[in-house]
Amino acid sequence: MRVARVPLLVLALAALGLTGCASVDPTGSFESTRELVAGRHPGTVHWQRGDQADAVATARAAELLAVPITPDSGAEIALIRNPELQGTLEGLGIAQAELAQASRLSNPGVSFSRLSGSGELQRTVAISADLVDWLVQPLRRRLAEAELERTRLEVGDALLGVVADARSAVVTYQAANQLLARLERIEAIDRSAADYAKALFDAGNLTALERANAEAAWAESQAEVGRARLDIVRLREAASLTLGLDPSDAWQVASELPLPPDATFDSKMLEERAVADRLDLVAARWAVDAIERALALKRKTRYVPVGVEVGVERERETDGINLTGPTVELRLPLFDTGKASIALLEAELARSNWQLRALEAQVRSSVRERGAELAANRELVTLYIETILPLRKEVLQRTLLEYNQMLVGTFDLLLAKQEEVDAERRALEALSGYWLARVALERAVGSPLPESAHGHHQDHSAAASGGSEENR
Amino acid sequence: MITRRDLLARAAVAGGSAALLSRTPLAAQEQDPHAGHQMPAAHADHQPKMAAPASRRTLPPPPTRSDIAGWRRDLGYTPVTTPDGVTAKWRMNGAWKEFHLVAEEIEQEFAPGMTVKVWGYNGGSPGPTIEAVEGDNVRIFVTNRLPEHTTIHWHGIFLPNGMDGVGGMLQPHIKPGETYVYEFKLRQHGTFMYHPHADEMVQMALGMMGFVVVHPKKPLAEPIDRDFCIFPHMWAIHPGTYRPDPSVMLDFDIFTLNGRAYPGTSPLIIRQNDRVRLRFANVSMTSHPMHIHGHRMWVVETDGGQIPRSAWVPESSLNIVNGQTRAADFVADVPGDWPLHCHKTHHAMNAMGHEVPNPIGADLREVGARVSELIEGYTTMGTAGMAEHAEHAEHMAGPENTLPMMAGTGPYGPIEMGGMFTMMKIRAGIDSYQDPGWYDHPEGTVAWKVDSAPEGLI
């Protein structure tokens, strides 16, 4: 621990010259994070920091809330108001502050020993502390910079996660509302059938059994409506939470999901884009790189009197592995010459490489799966819109022709109408399946699908509903 | 050993036709315009495939009284009239009276708005009425233009066993494209039928049947002025379809007289005091009680021939059981427009649903309004009965190729009939049997409305 005195002073001064450039203001990091994810999401993320910009963002959110919410406007609202996202953004502040901290030399220790009469010895110890700090400061700073970078990636990824969650929540809620409208219509049809059966029963023309059957069917469809209403309450809560809305916010969703845009996707191209663009993959590659650097450092400093302990923290997430970066500690190599640490880091590096490969495979698989889901739902929507719904309408029309000639009765007609509405319900399931798959695919790819400029979806809502709203 | 019969059959198959055997001119053709519309052409190409559906045959013009008198003088009998049908053309070839039936698919109009792909003979169902006299030697060529084999059974006629027409059992089937010949001497008189005895469920369900009328050699004591052949039949032509469904056993949709459903049936035109004969035959799945209004008919003939006068039975409804023929006479002494119809009420209707919930007497006003909101174009109907249906049918569209359940309009309003319904128009002093239009009732002979109901009678 004893070190020569003079060179230390020189070096300490030189080190001082290197420090002090890292700010505690995370604005720059925030802006660069925003740039990082620019083009990967609709709308602009706002970090509520109690400044004038808050008012602008609040007004923007209010403006978006004043009209029926679409999946994209919902995502934009969430980017302004979701409190969890705001919390995540604060991570930038933490990382920035840590960087600032890491960039500074610790204050020279001025300790005056009362135990010793030798002031010289005291000084030597104090300088020794500074020396250690000086030795590791560039390394610490580099690691803090890396940590900030990691945080930026993490925040960017979380931001895209919020976008996806918000869009899914809005789509699901929209679909639930549309579904409720269909179930209410089915309930009205069943009610008519039950009333009709009752009237025939009262006239002495229908058995009590047939009447009871009709009334049971009506009661069942009332139960379906009740369940759907509960779903709506739940889904509204979930959407409110994701979008960061309060009970005081009166908000509505757009009444109809639009039809899928006319676009097909090259799955191979999307895979390559996902592998290149996904922030979690970027982070994982960065982590591998960081371990490589830590290993190199460890190898170099193995016999340095003051040892550097580098390690890796990791946590598992459902969608892959998140490396949260190397750590650094300083130890005196009194008993441990670092042999085991190097072996550990080598193993960690190997493991991280495998995990990176696994994550890449998962990403590719996820893109393929979501892409297939998207394509299948698109085909289903097309089948419903172009074939099934027109056929159901034809069936209803032809049943009406037969009814007109007393070939079939009112029950057959009501059944044909119910099958038409039921086909609309299944078309709606396919349509919401499409939009949910699309949100999931865009999340899997890590950026919007090439053909979809956000906010430019054509609104075919009337067609999507089968154009039968007027029959309600 | 080659028999003469073999030669005949071969000649026919080889392209031959009646022409090869024909030496005499077409004796009957000129003298009997009534019978002269069905002479088959010589069919050189017997392709074993389905020919294009034949268009409906041309019906003969209504005869005049002098036409009938002339035919009766020349032939010794009053030729039959098959309303909406025809009598088979024939010619004499030596001792043989020759006919030719061509089994084929036909597009036949049952009534305006409904055309059906039936199987019949010589352009129609029922096929042409074969008319001959007791003692005649008849030779009947049968050409098959159906997609499957067929035969003809001469129902009720005394003949050699091998002429009875039971496919497989008594003769080889007549394959598509083939022509066979049947020969027998008519040893009896009466009203008979012909129909296939090969895949007969299908072939009769699709319309293959016809009359054979054999007049007695000894002229009737009281000559007939108008002799009508009427073949009731029932069909499963599901609403919106064009071809009978042979698999149906009970639930028939369409009921016809001579292949026409009211309002497509042609009326029977009769001069007052004409002696009228009505001949009926039935190959359908149930019996048809044929009812006439305003008269009673004497049942004078069965498949077995004339009934002795002492055994004649007066009836206003004559039940024609499946597989049976009957003839009944009456003197049309009361002028007017008199219905003639099957008295099974569903048989005097056109297509209707048999499982429609009965709305009669139900209060459907409120629920009906709600259903109208759910289904555009919906109207409740039938709560007071089905009569309104006849009016609805005029402005509310139904399925294609489907006749309204009830139809027809008379001078006093909707007639509300269908199916096996026609009219006998009996008029005084007419010379032509053309449709005279609606009867002009003498003053005070039509039921009239009074201002109030009588009291004390109930």
Image: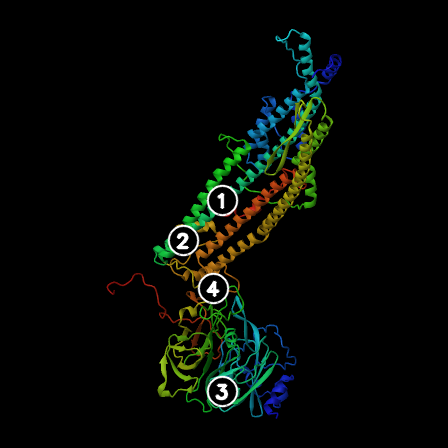
Mark 2 and mark 3: Cα distance apart in space: 68 Å
Q: Nearer the viewer, mark 3 or mark 4?
A: 4
Give the number of the mark in front: 1 or 4: 1
Check disc 1 and report its element: helix, strand or loop.
helix
Of badges 2 and 3, the one in the foreground is 2
Element at badge 3? helix
Query: Where is mark 3, residue-wise?
Result: B72
A51, above or below A363, in the image: above
Query: What SS does tag 2 mark?
Result: helix
Read off the residue under disc 2. Answer: A214
Residue A425, given in percent of the width and then of the height, sits at: 52, 48
**Chain letter of disc 2?**
A
Picture layout, residue B268 above or below residue A185: below
Q: Which disc is residue A181 wearing?
A: 1
**Could you give the CA–CA distance between mark 3 and mark 4, rounded to whole angstroms?**
41 Å
Residue B431 point in image, percent of width and height: 47, 80
Same chain? Circles 1 and 2: yes
Amino acid type assigned to the residue bearing label 1 in the image:
Ala
- Give the amino acid type for the residue marked by disc 3 in the picture: Arg
Judging from the image, mark 3 belongs to the subunit labelled: B
Q: Label 4 belongs to which residue?
A: B404
Chain at numbered mark 4: B
Q: Are marks 1 and 4 on the same chain?
A: no
Of all residues, the one furthest to the top in this rendering is A117
The amino acid marked with disc number 4 is Pro
Query: What is the secondary structure assignment of the residue under circle 4?
Result: loop
Q: Earlier in the sequence, mark 1 or mark 2?
A: 1
Residue pictured at 55% horizontal, 29% vertical: A83
Mark 3 Cα-neighbour bin, 10 Å: few <14, some 14–19, many ≥20: some
Q: Which chain letter goes with mark 1?
A: A
Residue A145 horizontal side relative to residue B295, left or right = right
